[in-house]
Image: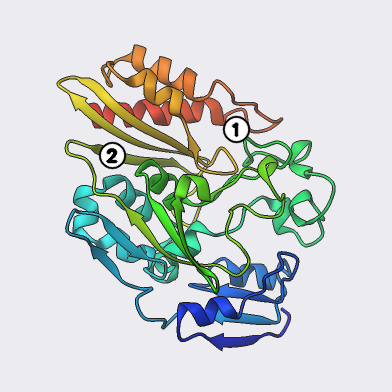
């Protein structure tokens, strides 16, 4: 690991001022919980001269509820805080379930919401310092023709990474927003617009966050009356593992029929994958019938393009969606 200076920022503005403006300048990086960043440092995927520590900045570790029921989550709130919060469990079930699925109890106690949303891809070519892949400035995505069991089946070209954040999948389904602060001011945008596909911008980043911006909070709007939500995830190990596939589903019911829906897939695309056409298809249908599950599964994965070793993700994701519909329709 390359030696670096550790700087304790006292305010968000100070932290932002210590970051580079030029995207090509990697001399300084933010440190939150450190669960992903320290791995990058040990594997020489990142070699900054300076780490700017966000821990201790007032307000970043706070979680508050506004009068209308909106939840504001500071970027330094731990994943464990979300998992254990009673009101989150009772009103934002998908978020609670996503938090509970992250890593292990030890990781959840240290890992932060901001860090989880901004973690880097887990593709083994990207994580290998010997592989100069497209994500690291190379000319090829080796997963396209190499080992790709865990890679994208949706939206992948030209880089077939998948976004590893479970929280992101649930939060996009819950229509969350993020606030970013830089020396020039503050901006807020929908989380769905925060993440990018490889073909939409630089291959070397996964979000629209500027180099000198600090994510300060996530806002989750008050759940509309009657909303039911769930997050389901399939992984190879019971803990300390990322999703092979995940489904975040929100439903509103009119009697035994779906009046509205929001569906986001995780573990199958370079960003949380919103299925707008499937949401429209579900309206007016019964969530518990096999016909609904088949139609929704076919529509949600209609654009899927499997690589040589990850075709299993298509039926797997369809099965998770069936389970989610049955769970919320029961």
**Mark 2: few/some/many CA within 10 Å (<14, 14-19, 20+):** many
The quarter of the displayed image where residue 292 is located: top left
The alpha-carbon separation of the residues under discs 1 and 2 comes to 23 Å
Q: Which residue is located at x 35 percent, y 73 percent?
A: 61
Callout 2: helix, strand or loop? strand
In-front residue for pair 63/1: 63
In the image: residue 164, left or right of residue 291: right
The quarter of the displayed image where residue 23 is located: bottom right
Give the color scheme: rainbow, by chain, secondary structure or one colour.
rainbow
Q: Which residue is located at x 33 percent, y 50 percent?
A: 95
Reply above or below: 304 against 31: above
Residue 186 percent location from the top left of the image:
47, 65
Q: Which residue is located at x 55 percent, y 67 percent?
A: 213
Is residue 234 visible to us here? yes
Reply above or below: 90 against 50: above
Disc 1 marks which residue? 154
Q: Do the residues bearing badges 1 and 2 touch, measured as CB atoms within 8 Å?
A: no
In-front residue for pair 73/146: 73
- Residue farthest along the top direction in this orientation: 291
Q: Which residue is located at x 51 percent, y 46 percent?
A: 193
Residue 164 percent location from the top left of the image:
54, 50
Tell me the number on the disc at residue 229. Answer: 2
For the C terminus, give its image quadrant: top left
For the N terminus, give its image quadrant: bottom right
Residue 97 percent location from the top left of the image:
32, 49
- Residue farthest along the right direction in this orientation: 139
In the image: residue 326, left or right of residue 316: left
Reply above or below: 206 against 39: above
Reply above or below: 326 against 238: above
Is residue 54 visible to us here? no
In the rendered structure, which disc, 1 or 2, sits on the residue that comes first in sequence?
Answer: 1
Residue 37 percent location from the top left of the image:
59, 69
């Amino acid at each position: 690991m390359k030696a670096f200076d550790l700087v304790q920022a006292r305010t968000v503005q100070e932290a932002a001022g210590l970051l580079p403006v030029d995207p090509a300048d990697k001399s300084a990086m933010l440190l939150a919980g450190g669960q992903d960043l320290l791995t990058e440092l040990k594997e020489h995927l990142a070699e900054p001269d300076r780490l700017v520590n966000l821990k201790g900045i007032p307000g970043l570790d706070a979680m508050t509820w506004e009068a209308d029921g909106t939840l504001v989550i500071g970027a330094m709130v731990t994943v464990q805080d979300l998992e254990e919060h009673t009101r989150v469990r009772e009103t934002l079930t998908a978020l609670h379930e996503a938090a509970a699925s992250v890593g292990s109890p030890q990781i959840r106690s240290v890992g932060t919401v901001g860090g989880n949303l901004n973690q880097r891809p887990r593709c083994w070519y990207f994580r290998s310092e010997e592989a100069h892949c497209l994500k690291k400035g190379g000319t090829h995505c080796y997963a396209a023709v190499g080992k790709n069991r865990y890679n994208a089946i949706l939206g992948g070209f030209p880089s077939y990474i998948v976004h590893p954040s479970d929280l992101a999948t649930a939060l996009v389904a819950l229509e969350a927003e993020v606030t970013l602060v830089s020396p020039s001011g503050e901006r807020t945008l929908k989380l769905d617009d925060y993440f990018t596909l490889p073909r939409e911008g630089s291959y070397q980043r996964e979000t629209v966050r500027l180099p000198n911006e600090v994510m300060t909070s996530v806002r989750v709007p008050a759940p509309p009356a009657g909303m039911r939500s769930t997050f389901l995830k399939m992984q190879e190990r019971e803990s300390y593992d990322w999703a092979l596939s995940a489904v975040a589903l929100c439903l509103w019911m009119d009697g035994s029929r779906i009046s509205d829906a929001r569906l986001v897939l995780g573990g199958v695309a370079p960003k949380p994958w919103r299925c707008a056409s499937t949401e429209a298809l579900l309206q007016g249908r019964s969530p518990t019938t096999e016909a609904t599950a088949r139609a929704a599964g076919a529509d949600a994965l209609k654009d899927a393009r499997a690589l040589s070793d990850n075709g299993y993700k298509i039926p797997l994701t369809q099965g998770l969606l069936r389970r989610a519909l049955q769970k919320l329709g029961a």
